[in-house]
Amino acid sequence: MLVNAKEMLDLAYENGYAIGHFNTNNLEWTKAILLAAEAKKTAVIISSSEGAAKYMGGFKTVANLVKNLHDALGITVPVAIHLDHGTYEGAKACIEAGYTSVMFDGSHFPIEENLEKTKEIVRLAHEKGISVEGEVGGIGGEEDGVASAGELADVEECKNLAACGIDFLAAGIGNIHGVYPADWQGLNFDRLKEISEAVKMPLVLHGGTGIPDDQIKKAISLGVSKINVNTECQIAFAKATREYIEEGKDQQGKGFDPRKLLLPGTNAVQALVEEKMDMFGCENSAK
């Protein structure tokens, strides 16, 4: 059985570690993330963007895939299926489709509209025991065509959004999606500390790919309890797949069989996810 993300993130917040949030794109990735969580004995959040869900056949397909793989693999650790950067309509659809957690990203709306829409998503989700992530201050870079410049969230706006009843908060602290440019200034820990002290709830760090380990650990010490990783998994998957083909392994025997062709990439994703779990300090937290 899948769970919502509130309890696992509250525990992480209270105990000074972070839970990994890993985007899935297909069956192989879902399996890799689940096996990594089981190996590391940690709760995990598997998420899809709306674009990935469309690619995979819709929200119900994603929810059912995670549930069925979870059961088939005998996973014993808590697992949440989460919508990443959801639109208002997307979040509502996921609440109906069987997701156990949703993010409504209203950060591009005027603050009053963000608050109003977030309150409605919280009401609909909490009626069904589903956890909700809200966002203030855009996360830089680009994901599924949503781009912004890595703003610093306003502390008062964070407080107002937290008061809407959300379970965890994503707030811009200089982080971006995708690969970080050479001239990136780093996370703004002063703003993170201000936000953390103001809202006193689990915070979410989007754009976990490429942030130096020491900055991630410092962010966790200041209240970040959920860290999103996507691009880094994509790069690892592509690299391992490229090596398999460049070595001509797809032309040896039945090396072209998708089960063999996709295996190196799948293993690379699992290895990376396990590595991230170690760094987030969540290993054995589900025991």
Image (cartoon, helix red, strand yellow):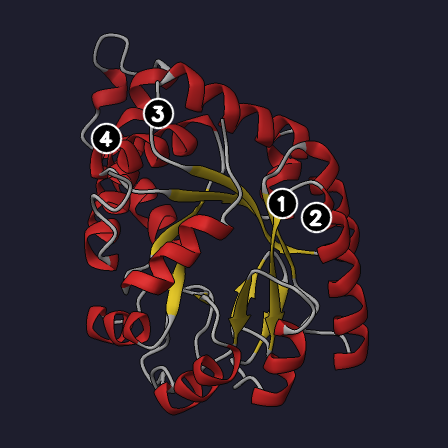
Q: Position of residue 195 (x, y in %)?
A: 48, 83
Amino acid type of disc 2? Ala
Amino acid type of disc 3? Ile
Up/down of 130 relative to 117, above or below: above
Contact flag, marks 1 and 4 (Cβ < 8 Å)? no
Q: Earlier in the sequence, mark 3 or mark 2?
A: 3
Amino acid type of disc 4? Tyr
Q: Earlier in the sequence, mark 2 or mark 1?
A: 2
Q: Position of residue 140 (x, y in %)?
A: 52, 75
Binning the other alpha carbons within 10 Å of mark 1 as few (below 14), some (14 to 19) or many (20 upward) gives: many
Task: Determine whether, in the image, residue 127 is placed left or right of residue 35.
Answer: right
Contact flag, marks 1 and 3 (Cβ < 8 Å)? no
For the residues carrying marks 1 and 3, which lies nearer the camera in this image? Answer: 1
Q: CA distance from mark 2 to mark 1?
A: 5 Å
Contact flag, marks 2 and 1 (Cβ < 8 Å)? yes
For label 2, the residue is: 125
Residue at screen point 25% across, 50% down:
277
Q: Earlier in the sequence, mark 1 or mark 4?
A: 1
Q: Position of residue 201 (x, y in %)?
A: 48, 69
For label 4, the residue is: 244
For label 3, the residue is: 75
Residue 31 placement: quadrant: top left
Residue 224 placement: quadrant: bottom left
Residue 260 placement: quadrant: top left
Amino acid type of disc 1? Ile
For label 1, the residue is: 130
Task: Determine whether, in the image, residue 77 is placed left or right of residue 203.
Answer: left
Binning the other alpha carbons within 10 Å of mark 3 as few (below 14), some (14 to 19) or many (20 upward) gives: some
Determine the secondary structure under disc 2. Answer: helix
Determine the secondary structure under disc 4. Answer: helix
